Image: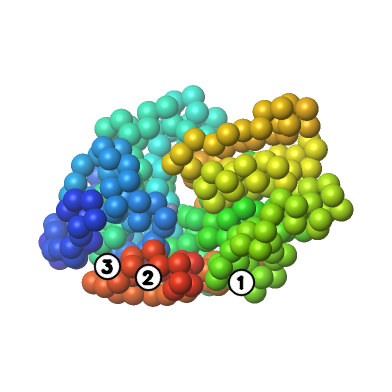
Amino acid sequence: MPSTMQALVVLEPGRMEIREVPVPTPGPNEVLARVRAVSICGTDAHIIRGDYPGFWPPAFPFIPGHEWAGEIAVLGPGADLYGWQVGDRVAGTSHDACGVCQKCVEGRYNLCENYGRAGLHKQYGHNVQGADATYVVQGVKTIFPLPDGLSFDQGAVIDPASIALHVANRGNITPGDTVAITGAGAIGLLAGDAARIRGAGRVIVVGRGSRLAKAAALGFETVNTAAGDPVGAVRRMTGGLGADVVLECAGVPEMVEWALEMLHRGGRCAAVGIPTLGVEIAMQRLVLDELELVGSRASAGEMRRVMPHVEAGRMRVREMVTHRFALGDYAAALATFNDRASGAIKIVVAP
Ligand SMILES: [Zn+2]
Ligand SMILES: [Zn+2]
């Protein structure tokens, strides 16, 4: 094992460098993994810009990255008891929850009551160092076997695929439902596949630009927000009724408002997009039409459950990867990610 490695180090908001840093050592129930592919998430762009000061990350310098796949290089004490061996191919996720609080024992570890408390909870690439490096240390609760048939690039998109399945689960989609997806980014497109996995009869993606074209190419019905009133369009497409379920994947205030307006009576909206501004909720309609609005945070148990759907091609992660860069070219990769004209959906970086 080398003693140092390459890592993307964010020195302060907006300023980053590829640096040679010490290879970390895995503690009890942790592994050191050789990162083979790490995918850029919208959250990474926010973290690098410094949009969540003092929270994600708690302090600079910081190594981001949380959607990755690779191979186990070193086992920390006890990791072998869970069956892990050096060389195992794995896909990683970010929430390493305490496992003991009431939310954790109920399986809702994404809502861990000990969030961010040192020694109890970590979220890799958010409040502790992440995977934008040659190696990463992660706890055994956050790594999952990557089937032989899946590449590392696909493995780096399992975490967002699990988040898409989680929002579809939070939406309680039942077979035959008409599902509208607001937002045609990676999570929105993957949520379209997740809706079908849950049995949606129709999936209508609401968005614009090259991302909406991608939604059409993937076989979803589409509504172009640039072409006029998207709520009216969804109503026209559904005989005036609206969608049974809306999965809100944009996090833009007007999209959230549209999401609620395009619901069928008694419909349910599950929101995974995180608006940075307040959103006005039409409470009168929510009450009188018995609408439901629920949040959806990361995933909770879906990493393993989504894997067979990825293998079978029902959750199309390969189709999401539009660009690939070496870790040394991270600045160019991030610029491509932030450029809407680039057609980027998922960008994979190889350390
Ligand atoms: Zn992510
Ligand atoms: Zn907990």
Is disc 1 in contact with disc 3, using a CB cutoff of under 8 Å? no
Which residue reaches farthest front? 228
- The picture places residue 180, in percent across and down from the top left corner, at 70, 53
In the rendering, at what x and y percent does residue 9 appear?
20, 57
Q: Can you tell which of label 1 and label 3 is closer to the viewer?
A: 1
Q: Quadrant of residue 334?
A: bottom left
> In the depicted view, which residue is nearer to us: 138 or 21?
21
Give the mark nearest the N terminus, 3 or 2. Answer: 3
Q: Secondary structure at mark 1?
A: helix
Q: Which mark is residue 336?
A: 2
- Would you name the residue on which mark 1 appears? 213
Tell me which residue sits at (58%, 56%) in the image. 183
Label 3–label 2 contact, CB within 8 A: no
Whether residue 82 sits left or right of residue 271 in the image: it is: left
Please tell me whether residue 306 is drawn above or below residue 273 in the rendered image: below
Q: Secondary structure at mark 3?
A: helix
Going from N to C along the chain, the mark reached first, 2 or 1, is 1
Q: Callout 2, which amino acid?
A: Thr
The Cα–Cα distance between marks 1 and 3, rounded to whole angstroms, is 26 Å
Question: Where is the N terminus found, in terms of image quarters?
Answer: bottom left
Q: Residue at x 21, y 42 (%)?
A: 59
Q: Which residue is the site of mark 3?
A: 331
- Gap in angstroms between the C-alphas marked 2 and 1: 18 Å
Q: How many C-alpha atoms fall within 10 Å of the one at disc 2: few (<14), some, or many (≥20)? A: some
Q: Amino acid at mark 1?
A: Ala
- Compared to residue 260, the image places residue 66 above or below, namely below
**Residue 39 picture location, percent across and down:** 40, 63
Quarter containing the C terminus: bottom left
| Residue 196: x %, y % from top left | 71, 58
